[in-house]
């Protein structure tokens, strides 16, 4: 990540997605963490293309 901070909000969203994947086999309870964070990450990346 050239020039971007290591503590970027993108990493927090990625962590939330990973935590959601670790919740268990019930794909309905962890779906908001995984998919919601993925959409938020996509939006963040669109707004910060160079970070």
Image (cartoon, rainbow, N blue to C red):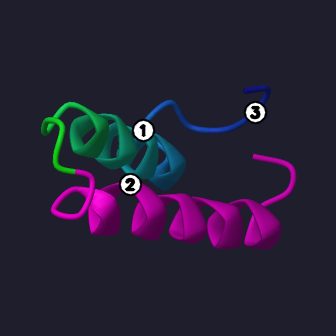
Q: Residue at x 54, y 58 (%)?
A: 38
Instruction: Nearest to the eye among marks 3 and 1: give it.
Output: 1
Is the residue 30 above or below the residue 44 in the image?
A: above
Instruction: Nearest to the eye among marks 2 and 1: give it.
Output: 2
Q: Residue at x 30, y 48 (%)?
A: 16
Q: Are marks 3 and 1 in contact (CB under 8 Å)?
A: no
Q: Secondary structure at mark 3?
A: loop
Q: Is residue 30 magenta?
A: yes
How crowded pointer 2 is (Cα within 10 Å; few <14, some 14-19, many 20+) is rated as many
Location of mark 3 (residue): 3
| Dot label at residue 46 | none
| Spatial CA span between label 3 and label 2 | 27 Å
Q: Is residue 19 magenta?
A: no
Location of mark 1 (residue): 7
| Spatial CA span between label 2 and label 1 | 20 Å
Considering depth in this image, is 13 or 17 the residue closer to the camera? 17
Magenta residues (range) = 27-51
**Which mark is first along the chain, 1 or 2?**
1
Q: Quadrant of the N terminus?
A: top right
Location of mark 2 (residue): 34
């Amino acid at each position: 990540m050239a020039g971007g901070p290591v503590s970027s909000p993108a990493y927090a969203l990625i962590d939330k997605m990973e935590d959601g994947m670790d919740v268990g086999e019930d794909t309905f309870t962890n779906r908001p963490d995984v998919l919601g964070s993925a959409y938020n990450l996509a939006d963040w990346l669109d707004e910060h293309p160079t970070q």
